[in-house]
Image (tube, coloured by chain):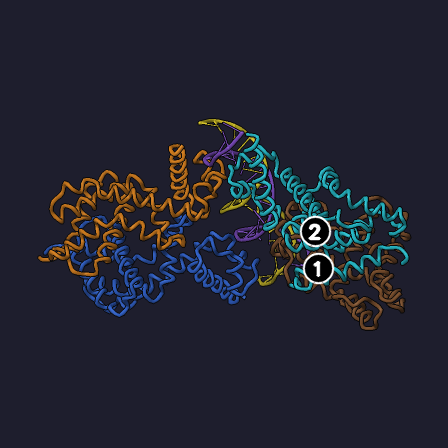
Chain colours: A orange, B blue, C brown, D cyan, E purple, F yellow
Amino acid sequence: MSDSAHEKREAIINAALKLFTERGFDNTPTALISQEAGVATGTLFRYYPTKEELINSTYIIAKNRFAAAMARGLEEETTLEARLRRIWGNTIRWGLESPQELLFLEQFLSSPYITKITEEEAMKKFAFLTELIEEGIAEGKLRDIHRGLIFDMLFSANRAVIKKILTHGMQDQTDMLIEGSFELVWSGLSKSQ
Amino acid sequence: MSDSAHEKREAIINAALKLFTERGFDNTPTALISQEAGVATGTLFRYYPTKEELINSTYIIAKNRFAAAMARGLEEETTLEARLRRIWGNTIRWGLESPQELLFLEQFLSSPYITKITEEEAMKKFAFLTELIEEGIAEGKLRDIHRGLIFDMLFSANRAVIKKILTHGMQDQTDMLIEGSFELVWSGLSKSQ
Amino acid sequence: MSDSAHEKREAIINAALKLFTERGFDNTPTALISQEAGVATGTLFRYYPTKEELINSTYIIAKNRFAAAMARGLEEETTLEARLRRIWGNTIRWGLESPQELLFLEQFLSSPYITKITEEEAMKKFAFLTELIEEGIAEGKLRDIHRGLIFDMLFSANRAVIKKILTHGMQDQTDMLIEGSFELVWSGLSKSQ
Amino acid sequence: MSDSAHEKREAIINAALKLFTERGFDNTPTALISQEAGVATGTLFRYYPTKEELINSTYIIAKNRFAAAMARGLEEETTLEARLRRIWGNTIRWGLESPQELLFLEQFLSSPYITKITEEEAMKKFAFLTELIEEGIAEGKLRDIHRGLIFDMLFSANRAVIKKILTHGMQDQTDMLIEGSFELVWSGLSKSQ
DNA sequence: AATGAATGAGCATTCATTCAT
DNA sequence: GATGAATGAATGCTCATTCAT
């Protein structure tokens, strides 16, 4: 029972993720989502009592997946630079593999649906990055600007790379572009020389 | 007549800009826009036959205003670095003064409304920046990565700064943050050392 | 213009009155009302922005018609008894002619839709009866019980007569029943003997 | 088993009675009733296969309780007048104690849910009153109008008194109002004197 | 017999767009 | 050209009822 319930929740979220990305929140009827998920219209509302709650839940799931992809293999790296490079590459590759989820995340962030709770909830999963930056600053390896700023600039630059690759079909140059853009970012962020 | 027509077009666009930003595209009925613009519901459709076309037009206007603000006083600067710094500062200050329009632009970019035509149309006004970057690369002053990428990373980093200042109410440290973030970006972008 | 608007308002109210009575408030879709009224679904909401407001408006109209029917020819009568008898007969005859409206009124009164405003608004039209009762008590012709009580007992007894006639198909004995029931009521209400 | 079945039937009826009165028929989901009754949604439908049947059953139960309250202590009284007076008082006092059930009864009567069968079924319990009236007429003590009419006028006047007391918070004058209103009614009903 | 998850028809309301005036 | 009333398709959500467990 609990099993079939989980399956349904997930089917709905996946359908929502797909459709929201393809068509936008407001242009995606709940009826279409339930259809795509293979459940009845009423069923959707048993699991997510409101379209808004469905949107928020979808966001949290997507952001968690994103955070997990980002941190993949991180423990193998030792230096600050290597870790950031790993994160940088992970993120771009994930974005190229799951452009829908990335788009969804962006769409969500500039929409009126974000609740503070949703956002806080989601940020917890990124603690490892925040801490990495803190450390870097503390050890004098990163410039000492507002740390939130570094975080955001990293993200935004990263997204810019992904978009560029996707828009221009440059997937074959991915490795090179990851490397090139990271160097650029790292020169910007790191202290000394 | 042509005059009153122009006035009406503009009134509608301004109303649309205001309301779209405050309420989002889908939560802004055309009836509300025409009301705010002081025209009849039917009149709006004489000038913009579709809500979608109105959204696109509004986007172009907003982006043009943005481009103009960005280039303000650019001719006073001579070196590449000075020019980029000027643009960097202009952009951040504009974003702080007109957060609504900035929001509108972002909302638009991650919405399903953008037509390729709209985007191309809008990019023309940014030619001066593209050319500046071309020049920089040609003269060996900027790293030789995909130029569009530099453009986008610049933009996204810039927006990150604005958002940070707005979100955290750091307007009093604006100058310092502009300078700090520019140095970071410039270290990243510029070649040598 | 104002003319067609009035016509539409009235068509909607009449359709509502008919359908509410036949099917009950909650079993009457607004779509059915607009159809019966010969207007589009959206049009109904231009005139009555909410189903609830439509119900309230319908109630007020029906109650006004009722009050008007009740007072018909009242000025021709001179004594208290004659006036009450006239009202009594008017009311029963109206109820027999417009059983739908009467049913509607009753349905409304025992539903959760009555607003105090609605009720007060509606009671104004019955001032003439209230005043008549006041006078009667003041002149010592009517028993001196709580006046609102007299009013209500009159009404309820009256309705009982109408219902009985309708239920048992006794329309041919109407005059006799009016007379008989009035005597009964009058013996109850009037003082002396 | 038959026992637990009875318990369940009763629990459901009681929950229904409570909720229907508080919220109206159409605003009371069957799911809420089963919850309040402490049974599963499906269970309710085993006992009352339709919401409509549940409503009708609830009505019969409530009306039976009402009839029982009405007749309380009736055997102690000997004359026609005393008996009617007892009934009159019983009814008003019951209405004041159980306004919810009274409301329910009224709500039901002016709703589209009454089936003829339901009504006939319910009326059996009032046989004692009908007979009393018959007798009174036969013995020449009551006016000889249609007997059903007398019955209904009695009821409706009675309800008017209850409502008045409840609405105006006149509970402290209950005895006096009972007496006053009965006199009024008795003068109306009884022959000659 | 009991449970409660699943179903899907049904409904109030909104809103882009049309068109008679 | 301008107006704004009219249109009716579209949508989020509810709830009586069914049925697999």
User: Is the C terminus of chain D in the top left, top right, bottom left or bottom right quadrant?
Assistant: bottom right
Report in which chain the residue with disc 1 lies.
Answer: C
Report in which chain the residue with disc 2 lies.
Answer: C
Q: Give the number of the mark in front: 1 or 2.
A: 2
Give x and y (percent) for residue D71.
72, 47
Report the number of discs: 2
Q: Residue at x 44, y 58 (%)?
A: B23
Residue C65 visible (yes or no):
no
Please tell me whether mark 2 sits on a helix, a strand or a loop: helix
Q: Which residue is mark 1?
A: C60
User: Is the N terminus of chain D in the top left, top right, bottom left or bottom right quadrant?
Assistant: top right
Q: Mark 1 vs mark 2: same chain? A: yes
**Which amino acid, by three-letter code, is at mark 2?**
Gln
Q: Is residue B109 left or right of residue D108?
A: left
Local crowd at mark 2 within 10 Å, few (<14), some, or many (≥20)? many
Residue at the farthest bottom position: C138
Q: Residue at x 73, y 37 (%)?
A: D117
Disc with the residue nearer the chain's start (1 vs 2): 1
Give x and y (percent) for residue D28.
58, 46
Residue at the farthest left position: A193
Give x and y (percent) for residue D162.
70, 57
Q: Residue at x 47, y 55 (%)?
A: B27
Q: Is residue E12 left or right of residue B134?
A: right
The residue closer to the viewer here, F19 or D145, is D145
Q: Which residue is mark 2?
A: C107
The residue closer to the viewer here, D64 or A63, is D64
